[in-house]
Image (tube, helix red, strand yellow):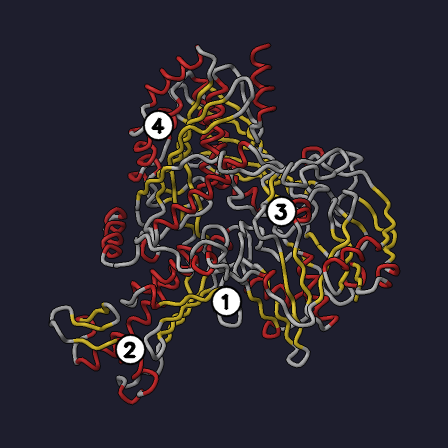
């Protein structure tokens, strides 16, 4: 069977299911609408104390001493702890990276603060107000040091070390080569260069970081309530660093007001609160304020990409060399080269390019640590499509024709990219062609020329997105990471016929309570209304890798479907025994096991459940009581989805303002469980991408002070920024995943960053301007336009 036939076969099997593919309203929304959501800050425990943190006012400074005496005398202050004291009963976090020096991070700094906002002491008091007053009374004697702020010069002679246990501020420099890169450049008619620079961003979820930690002295158990995208991994980390066994730690992630990658790691503040709850044997709460969120929560995307493209005069791309830089900030929660390597792996994007070399450079600086932000590789589609536009400009060719010439189609797949990634069932050229068929580019170019004569600048950008969605364990092994890509789920059919589901993924606003119910209901011939989904509690959920990347659909829903199908097999086995029919002649419809041919021959699932639990002697010989299935699933090496984004803009030549006139998305995420939820993911991701291109930026001054520390300075997209977004779906199932699910969530950010940036570049190019640095703010646009006029 060909791969196309396999995809068609998967699509046909999905078509038989009544709920997969339906736009069902989200079950979880009711409790939010009526104000009954339960977030971490809603949790209150008798006797609860509150924490606040003393933070460094310097970007780089030694800690000579910390005097806590005055704070401890303040009525209501219960305890003050420093990094040196915490180190006596906790272990540091050590980030390992193959081939590079490990980076060690204490719960709180012992000797030196490495960025402005670095937490150096914790005050615990009867309420947050007293705790904050106590913070003001802690005296720190600082020895300020020169800050390291420029990643490109972080390792220059005479620059102080940010982490004195590491020999250089250039933590990582490594080169990866694929194919005959030297031969490709030797054969080229021309070498074209291009630059792409992304600014530093942060997450800004509505719900900031927060934790409530309790210690049960009788049972010697720690309970950690907090937004945790990877609850089990967080439990393991807590146990390791606090000297506990995992059965002494429970992590509960209640309703989450936005994760976006921020709520993946165990931050030092949350860990300190947990350690202090154990030490004081009292419950403690800490809720991050917005200033702390903007200055001390992980930042992201401070990346630069330089490319050299070897091309023939007809536009054929022979090879690419790339130089990638990342400013990782002061500490590491992840292997420092991880994210920039993802950009390297994906930089060839939608194009057939066999010869490739990239070098990654990761610098440590005196800025807030960097981490993952939804689509941490957001720059990659702008760079891959942007370099093709730069080639077309140099060769005097139409950029869309040049891109199409080098672009992958379904007929080219399965295809292995130069770095070894398997592309399958991706409709890259097909989606690109469909987008162009619905947008008359020739008519637009005429309109663009007419507008230019009248002093108006309009442009169009089309982005071809390749989105990695699910990383299997084989990928982690190949990339030198000891992580796992597996997921786990348990499905139970209770004696009343009700269905309960739990899994290792954690809901952070994606609608999992609805979409998981749809998948399981289809497998068990029930209704989503009969399926209850509970996530984010390590006492009941099986050990899984959580919600990160875009793995929730293919991995999390895939394993739930497999578990439900295992349970279905048992239900049908009991039904076959009771009805005296072969199991293969039966199916489950509307909570009844029925025959495929004999009308009226059936048995209710509830009766089967009653027998399974309360009358096991009536079960088939050798069958154990109960109706429960546990399943683990390790996805393929890597799965991908794809999309095409089109953005049309107008740039005001007098103010530098950008108006988005049209935005259209052709998304192919394989089998869609709930298209309405997918549309919501597209809308949210596009909005975030627009924010990166036009508005958002975390800036530091020469002393290393964050000067974007309020929402008046760190600008976010609003209703007047985000246009109407048209979404159309292509559904090309992946033949290698359960139900053909690919997943999606981060691709819309990639697509928006690329299409909006390309559209603005297209508009400005008409006046001779060139843009390489995000964000494209009015001041930056005006500067480029003025320079082009005077040049």
Separation of disc 2 and disc 3 at Cα? 53 Å
State which tag comes first along the sequence, 2 or 1.
Answer: 1
* Residue drawn at x 39%, y 62% as measured from the top left: 559
The residue mark sitting in front, 2 or 3, is: 2
Separation of disc 4 and disc 3 at Cα? 36 Å
| Element assignment for label 1 | loop
Q: Mark 4 packing: few (<14 Cα in 10 Å), some, or many (20+)?
A: some
Residue at numbered disc 4: 405
The residue mark sitting in front, 1 or 3, is: 1
| Element assignment for label 3 | loop
The residue mark sitting in front, 2 or 4, is: 2
Nearest the eye: 368 or 26 = 26
Find out whether the residues at labels 2 and 3 contact each other: C-beta distance under 8 Å.
no
Separation of disc 2 and disc 4 at Cα? 58 Å
Instruction: Find residue 606 and name its label.
Output: 2
State which tag comes first along the sequence, 4 or 1.
Answer: 4
Where residue 519 appears, as percent x and y from the top left, is: 34, 61
The residue mark sitting in front, 2 or 1, is: 2
Q: Is residue 159 left or right of residue 398?
A: right
Q: Is residue 306 visible?
A: no
Find out whether the residues at labels 2 and 1 contact each other: C-beta distance under 8 Å.
no
Q: Is residue 35 left or right of residue 558?
A: right
Separation of disc 2 and disc 1 at Cα? 29 Å
* In this view, 614 is above or below 122: below
Where residue 72 appears, as percent x and y from the top left, is: 84, 63
Instruction: Find residue 543 and name its label.
Output: 1
Separation of disc 1 and disc 3 at Cα? 26 Å
**In this view, which residue lies farthest toward the bottom?**
617
Residue at numbered disc 3: 336
Find out whether the residues at labels 4 and 3 contact each other: C-beta distance under 8 Å.
no
């Amino acid at each position: 069977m060909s791969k196309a036939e396999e995809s068609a076969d998967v699509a046909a099997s999905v078509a038989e299911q009544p709920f997969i593919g339906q736009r069902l309203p989200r079950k979880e929304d009711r409790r939010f609408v009526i104000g009954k959501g339960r977030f971490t800050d809603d949790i209150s425990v008798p006797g609860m104390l509150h924490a606040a943190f003393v933070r460094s006012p310097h970007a780089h400074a030694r800690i000579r001493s910390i005097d806590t005496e005055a704070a401890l005398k303040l009525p209501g202050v219960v305890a003050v702890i420093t990094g040196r004291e915490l180190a006596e009963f906790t272990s540091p976090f050590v980030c390992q990276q193959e081939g590079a020096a490990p980076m060690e991070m204490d719960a709180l700094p012992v000797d030196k603060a490495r960025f402005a906002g670095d937490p150096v002491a914790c005050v615990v008091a009867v309420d947050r107000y007293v705790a904050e007053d106590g913070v003001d009374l802690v005296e720190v004697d600082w020895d300020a040091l020169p800050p390291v702020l420029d990643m490109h010069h972080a390792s220059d002679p005479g620059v102080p070390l940010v982490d004195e246990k590491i020999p250089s501020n250039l933590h990582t420099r490594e080169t990866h080569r694929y194919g005959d890169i030297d031969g490709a450049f030797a054969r080229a008619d021309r070498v074209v260069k291009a630059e792409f620079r992304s600014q530093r961003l942060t997450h800004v979820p509505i719900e900031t970081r927060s934790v409530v930690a309790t210690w049960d002295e009788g049972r010697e158990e720690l309970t950690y309530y907090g937004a945790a995208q990877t609850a089990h991994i967080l439990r393991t980390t807590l146990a390791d660093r606090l000297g506990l066994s995992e059965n002494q730690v429970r992590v509960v992630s209640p309703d989450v007001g936005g994760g976006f990658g921020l709520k993946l790691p165990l931050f030092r503040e949350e860990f300190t609160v947990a350690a202090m709850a154990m030490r004081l044997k009292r419950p403690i709460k800490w809720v991050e304020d917005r200033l702390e969120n903007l200055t001390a929560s992980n930042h992201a995307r401070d990346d630069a990409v330089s490319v050299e493209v070897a091309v023939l005069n007809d536009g054929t791309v022979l090879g690419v060399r790339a130089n990638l830089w990342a400013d990782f900030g002061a500490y590491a929660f992840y292997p420092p080269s991880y994210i920039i390597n993802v950009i390297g792996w994906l930089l060839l994007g939608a194009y057939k390019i066999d010869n490739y070399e990239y070098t990654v450079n990761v610098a440590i600086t005196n800025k807030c640590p960097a981490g993952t932000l939804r689509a941490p590789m957001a720059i990659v589609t702008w760079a891959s499509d942007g370099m093709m536009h730069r080639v077309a400009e140099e060769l005097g060719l139409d950029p869309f024709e040049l891109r199409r010439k080098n672009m992958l189609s379904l007929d080219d797949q399965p295809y292995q990219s130069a770095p070894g990634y398997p592309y399958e069932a991706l409709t890259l050229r097909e989606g690109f062609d469909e987008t162009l068929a619905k947008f008359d580019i020739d008519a637009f170019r005429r309109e663009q020329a007419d507008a230019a004569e009248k002093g108006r600048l309009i442009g169009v950008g089309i982005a071809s997105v390749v989105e990695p969605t699910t990383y299997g364990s084989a990928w982690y092994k190949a990339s030198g990471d000891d992580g796992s890509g597996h997921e786990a789920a348990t499905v139970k059919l209770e004696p009343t016929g009700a269905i309960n589901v739990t899994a290792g993924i954690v809901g952070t606003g994606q609608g999992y309570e609805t979409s998981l119910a749809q998948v399981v209901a289809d497998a068990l011939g029930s209704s989503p209304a009969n399926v209850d989904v509970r996530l984010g509690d390590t006492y009941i959920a099986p050990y899984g890798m959580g919600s990160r990347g875009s793995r929730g659909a293919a991995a999390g829903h895939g394993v739930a479907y497999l578990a439900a199908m295992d349970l279905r097999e048992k239900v049908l086995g009991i039904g076959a025994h009771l009805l005296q029919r072969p199991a293969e002649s039966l199916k489950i419809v509307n909570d009844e096991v029925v025959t495929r041919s004999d009308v009226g021959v059936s048995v209710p699932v509830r009766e089967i459940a009653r027998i399974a639990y309360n009358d096991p002697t009536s079960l088939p010989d050798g069958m154990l009581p109960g109706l429960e299935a546990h399943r683990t699933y390790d996805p393929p090496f890597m799965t991908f989805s794809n999309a095409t984004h089109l953005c049309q803009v107008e740039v005001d030549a007098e103010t530098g303002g950008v108006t988005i006139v049209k935005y259209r998305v052709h998304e192919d995420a394989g089998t869609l469980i709930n298209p309405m939820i997918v549309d919501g993911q597209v809308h949210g991701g596009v909005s975030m991408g627009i924010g990166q291109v036009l508005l958002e930026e975390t800036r530091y001054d020469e002393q290393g002070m964050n000067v974007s520390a309020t929402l008046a300075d760190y600008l976010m997209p609003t209703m007047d920024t985000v246009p109407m977004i048209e979404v159309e779906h292509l559904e090309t199932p992946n033949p290698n995943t359960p139900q053909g699910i690919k997943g999606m969530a981060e691709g819309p950010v990639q697509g928006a960053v690329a299409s909006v940036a390309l559209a603005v570049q297209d508009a400005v190019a008409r006046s001779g301007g060139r843009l390489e640095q995000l964000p494209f703010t009015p001041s930056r646009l005006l500067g480029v336009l003025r320079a082009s006029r005077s040049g």
